Amino acid sequence: MRRALVTASMLALALPQAAFAKGEFDPSEEFEQHAWVSIHIGSLDLSITKAVAYLMLGSVLTMLIGVTLMRARAGRAQALGEQIYEVAQTQVAEQGLPSKGIARWFPYVATLMLFIFVVNLIGFIPLPLSDEKWHGLPTLGIYAATSSLSVTLALALLTFFFTHFEGIRWNGPVRYFKSWIPEVPKALLPLIIPLEVLGQFMRLISLSVRLFANMLAGHMLILTFIGLMFVLESTVLAIVAIPAATAFYLFEVIIVVGIQAFIFAALSAIYIGSAIEPEH
Amino acid sequence: MVLSLIAATAGNVDAGKAIALALGIGLGSLGAGIGIGNIFGSMIQAVARQPELRGELQGIQWLGFALTEAVVFYGLIGGLLAYVLI
């Protein structure tokens, strides 16, 4: 079963959609958003694009995984569910959150981890969700919703708002904002305060750009290696391009997908935890 | 070497941009490579000294790995922004 899955995904990688599109191939086109179903409310653009479709699929899968694995009574499903729960509990929540905040924020960080993991992972499975058509059918393509900055920025904004909301709720606004400023000589304060305030917003950027750039670069690498054959129009390159693309594919699926989900959740837990219980 | 490259491609803006992007990402990955090597080296030492702490250290190790690795991508995004905007 597992071997068949690996073979199928490798075959799908070796036959990318670019094979059907003769001539020009540009990897960055894979990341363009075209409105499939146009929805405009005032100046708000809520059109359903590739990223939205992947997000919807990811949400449904996350819920299914949560319901089936966490409620499993016996067997392999239960063991897997317990393993996921244990990682979320010991490695993510308990590392960052203080004991008084864990009951409230464990569901958030655990969901975040599972959701980002699922959305990242379905991005590496060739799915018929692409803009190109081949005899009327959408061609197979790999695309991750998390390789769009809007998606990761929305997730980072959630953490950002929850952090400050919890900080103010537990400590009161005055004590919380005072806790941002470290103990330094008074003369240095005009220099330190803007830096610390800027630092809070830099978290937003680093949290979102880390996930976005990782997924974008991973997909770009794979697409560029495969696309090289079509750009240079020589099938001999396949000897180099397909093993290299497969190696990057395996690296991304085995290491990066899980690590990035873990990191995003762990950092969210640390940020929220440090706002609930400031060090000084 | 850099100067000779610049001289060879004088007047060719696209070539210059390509070289700048490649050099920037290359130098960025140099730093991150050193950092990632440090993290795994320290991890090996720590586990060799106290194997019973492996489980606890692993979380910190992957956190450090991802934080360091992300530095390359900040460089990549900066490079791509410069490439597209200029």
Image (cartoon, coloured by chain):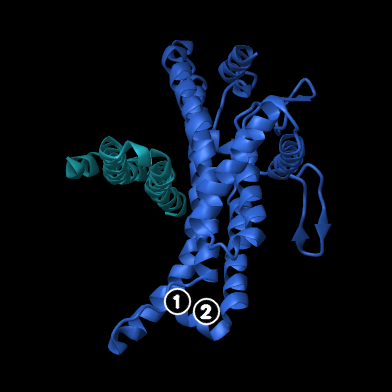
**Residue drawn at (61%, 39%) of the image:** A84
| Number of numbered discs | 2
Q: Quadrant of residue A40?
A: bottom right
Q: Where does the image place residue A188, in percent across and percent down from the top left?
A: 30, 84
Residue named by callout 2: A176
Instruction: Name which residue lies at 56% across and 79% down.
Output: A171
Cα distance in 3D space between marks 2 and 1: 7 Å
The subunit letter for the residue under badge 2 reads A
The chain ID associated with circle 1 is A
Check residue A256 in the rendering and tell me which mark sits there, or answer none: none
Are the two marked residues, 2 and 1, in contact with CB atoms closer than 8 angstroms?
Answer: yes
Identified by mark 2, the residue type is Tyr
* Residue A180, label in figure: 1
Q: Amino acid at mark 1?
A: Trp
**Left or right side of A278 for A145:** right
Indicate the quadrant where residue A133 lies: top right
Relative image position of residue A140 (x, y in whole percent): 68, 25
Q: Where's the C terminus of chain B, which quadrant? A: bottom left
